[in-house]
Amino acid sequence: MKKLIYILLFLFPVFVVAQQPCYKSSPMNSIWSNVGNVGFSAGLAQYTSLAFSPSGQPYVAYEDAGNSQKAAVMKFDGSSWINVGSAGVSDSVAYWTSIAFSQSGQPYVAYEDFGNSQKATVKKFDGTNWITVGAAGFSANDVRYINLAFSPSGGQPYVAYEDEGYSPKATVMKFNGTSWVNVGDADFSAGQAQYISLAFSSSGVPYVAFRDWGNNEMATVMKFDGNSWVNVGSAGFSAGMIFIISLSFNPLDGQPYVAYSDGENSNKATVMKFDGTNWITVGNADFSADGANYINLAFSPSGEPFVAYSDEANIDKATVMRFNGVNWVNVGNEGFSAGWANYTSLAFSPSGQPYVAYEDGGNYAKTTVMSYDSAFLGVNVIQKSRLSIYPNPASDKITIETSVETQESYFEIVNIEGQQLITRQISEPKTQISISALPSGVYFVRLTNDKTVEVRKFVKE
């Protein structure tokens, strides 16, 4: 029987990823794996926000209870998660952390600043230190649900938030190079605006989506037309009350999409898009098995919408689904995180891999980041493999040999559950690794650099 399993394993083809996404599923070849160590934050982490630098490094921002609840930013250097600048980015307690990169590649973080009457503050990393952009606490009032994004046309940072003044409506501000100024009128929504999500069209028009208390707590999207904020389609276009909402633009056709938790149907996930006239449902409404909390929407480079969320059908663990043109389908296993996953944040690497950051209930509520890997990624660009493992099967040691450039390359060994077991920077074409401590079973070696991802299987006897 063991021999039969080995024969079947080696009948699977090996693929080389040439940075083009094409997601297909296979139980043995498609896995969610940890990026670096699990639970890498100093303490409990809330308001996780994930983004990629232009060079392709994942960064995550969050409120860190292990550092006096200050904002923290860490990046993955290929082997481990390291602080970007000092461990405490903010000067005091920071809520609603949101990270984004300028066109020049500098990370910026926006947050609700408890050291400045809970008003909005934005900082950027200058390569050595985190410095305040404009004035600290620049908003007129205290803020909630702050969201940061950069204009693709002017390169200016914008923030959208719920303005906790006399009436907690939506406000958007931008930094003009000297100070933060309102974009159109402040408090422009019809009523209270919760769960604000900010995104730009390809032409540089800012859009915001929110739960609209001025329209029965339904979904509303508005855009700035150069003079004022106007509704995109009908206000309150969802079928009923919603909760968390996430806005993103399809990179291929430029249409705005929203994903939200449908309060009228057990908080299940629904995605809608604006076709130029109306908001229409993408696939089936309420497509998740149960409630989809902390829902976050992002597009693959090929234009497929993906959603990540905390999945009530799987004890609030993380699940990611994508729309394949007909139906919403799971990306890998549903409920793939070790424990419950709060504040799920989804982003794609430049190579097209989906990454998810979250507060990890399976690891003391600290921050964990996972990525989805498939030997079938880029199947339309199959090349000769430049990664070999021998002996295979093995019981004590394996040799990993590669012909790729070793500079900026590293490999990981993960099991079929996606748990990362060994990570190492590659310094020589041949690397010998002891596997004597691993239980018998099937494992994957993933080789990664800025041009290629390769995956091979091996068997530990």
Image (cartoon, helix red, strand yellow):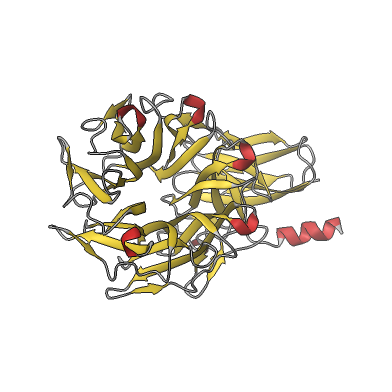
Q: Is residue 96 above or below residue 92?
A: below
Q: Is residue 67 above or below residue 267?
A: above
214 left or right of 453 in image: left
Task: Say which residue appears at 80% left-offset and 41% top-offset.
Answer: 395
Residue sticking out furthest to the left: 227
Q: Please state which of residues 209 and 461 is positioned toward the viewer in this rendering.
A: 209
Task: Say which residue appears at 53% left-offset and 69% top-offset.
Answer: 287
279 left or right of 396 in image: left
- Quarter of the image that includes the C terminus: top right
Q: Position of residue 51 (x, y in %)?
A: 40, 44
Q: Please state which of residues 112 and 86 is positioned toward the viewer in this rendering.
A: 112
Q: Is residue 379 above or below residue 87?
A: below
Q: Please state which of residues 214 and 57 is positioned toward the viewer in this rendering.
A: 214
- Quarter of the image that includes the N terminus: bottom right
Query: So how many labels did they put on this image?
Result: 0
Find residue 319 and report its image quarter. Answer: bottom right
Residue sticking out furthest to the front: 166
Task: Say which residue appears at 45% left-offset and 41% top-offset.
Answer: 47
Residue sticking out furthest to the right: 1
Find residue 50 and report its image quarter. Answer: top left
Q: Position of residue 394 (x, y in %)?
A: 77, 43
User: Is any atom of residue 146 visible in this view?
Assistant: yes
Q: Position of residue 80 (x, y in %)?
A: 53, 32
Q: Position of residue 198 (x, y in %)?
A: 31, 53
Q: Is residue 101 above or below residue 219?
A: above
226 left or right of 96 in image: left
User: Is any atom of residue 250 visible in this view?
Assistant: no
